[in-house]
Image (spheres, rainbow, N blue to C red):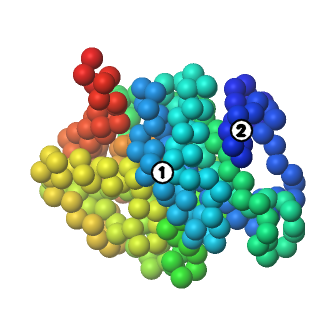
Amino acid sequence: FDQLDGQIWFNGEFIPWRDAKIHVLTHGLHYASAVFEGERAYGGEIFKLREHTERLIESGRILGFTLPYSAEEIDTACSELLRRQGFSDAYVRPIAWRGSESMGVSAQKNRINVAIAIWQWPSYFNPEERMKGIRLDLAEYRRPDPRTAPSRAKASGLYMICTISKHAAEAKGYADALMLDWRGQVAEATGANVFFVKDGAIHTPTPDCFLDGITRRTVIELARRRGIEVNVRAIMPEELSDFSECFLCGTAAEVTPVAEIGPYRFAPGEISRQLVSDYMAEVTPKRIAAE
Ligand code: PMP
């Protein structure tokens, strides 16, 4: 991946992709003092760019650092890099981390670095394939208590248990894993939020110890626009057998129906289908939709 062509925005400059390197004694690598974003561009425009940039800045603040660029500067860098990369549909990955000026848990004076990379990451599935639904394992690790980890930040350190859980699921032939939280309530997948359907209404867990995804908020708005009732509440795993449909949503996953979670079965149906298509319409720039 580090040998691709193109450019990366690195601390204010556009540099060749292959030259975007950091030192092995980077604090972010050793102590996870890093925060990042995941964004998608559709038709040459980054969907909800400012919301992502603001979350990046806020994630840094939660980890105790200030990004040395304004939201305007980061937005401009993302948009200019997208243009330079020449993609109209692409994935955008800004990241900020503490540098290598000193080693040890304390790194007050280490530089805060910011970089942005953009590459092509097609939707996982075509619409027909997507409606078959993916299979999820139940993860062993749980999302931590917000008093144990800064769960509102999109912080690299919070992904350690996500990678372990996703690898364990993949080893058993599943696409992903559903994680419970420290109380034993349903939380989210390893990189996406989860929704359920029962009797024509939507149910989704309260995001009090995991990321309140930008896609999650978009999907709730789209569902309400269609007059679908949305219940945000604590969901226990025993309830999974009561739901008829289930889907994941996130920037990379978009809206992806789920067919199976461990022993539970779901039939991707009308509400999932509507929201898959409403989401695709919502992310498509208006000028393209009008063509
Ligand atoms: N939870 C986790 C753990 C994630 O990595 C993501 C993807 N960023 C989400 C939820 C969904 O967030 P968003 O819709 O903002 O991409």
Q: Nearer the viewer, residue 169 or 230?
A: 230
Label for residue 198? none
Q: Nearer the viewer, residue 239 or 193?
A: 193
Q: Classify mark 1: residues with Cα within 10 Å, few (<14), some (14-19) or many (20+).
A: many
The quadrant where residue 262 appears: bottom left
Measured along the vertical axis of the image, is residue 66 above or below residue 185? above
Q: Amino acid at mark 2?
A: Glu
Q: Among all residues in the image, which is located at the extreme left?
A: 227
Q: Is residue 156 visible?
A: no
Q: What kind of element bears circle 2?
A: strand
Measured along the vertical axis of the image, is residue 177 above or below residue 254? below
**Left or right of 276: which side holds 14?**
right
Q: Are marks 2 and 1 in contact (CB under 8 Å)?
A: no
Which residue occupies 76% across, 67% down? 31
- Give the foreground label among 2 and 1: 2
Pointer 1 residue: 52
Label for residue 13? 2
The quadrant where residue 253 appears: top left
Mark nearer the N terminus (2 vs 1): 2
Label 2 C-beta lies within 8 Å of the nearest ligand 1 atom: no
Image quadrant in which the N terminus is located: top right
Task: Where is residue 200? Give x, y as percent.
Answer: 15, 53
Which residue occupies 55% across, 56% down? 56
Measured along the vertical axis of the image, is residue 171 above or below residue 179? above
**Left or right of 212: which side holds 27?**
right
Task: Where is residue 264? Give x, y as percent.
Answer: 36, 57
The quadrant where residue 83 appears: top right
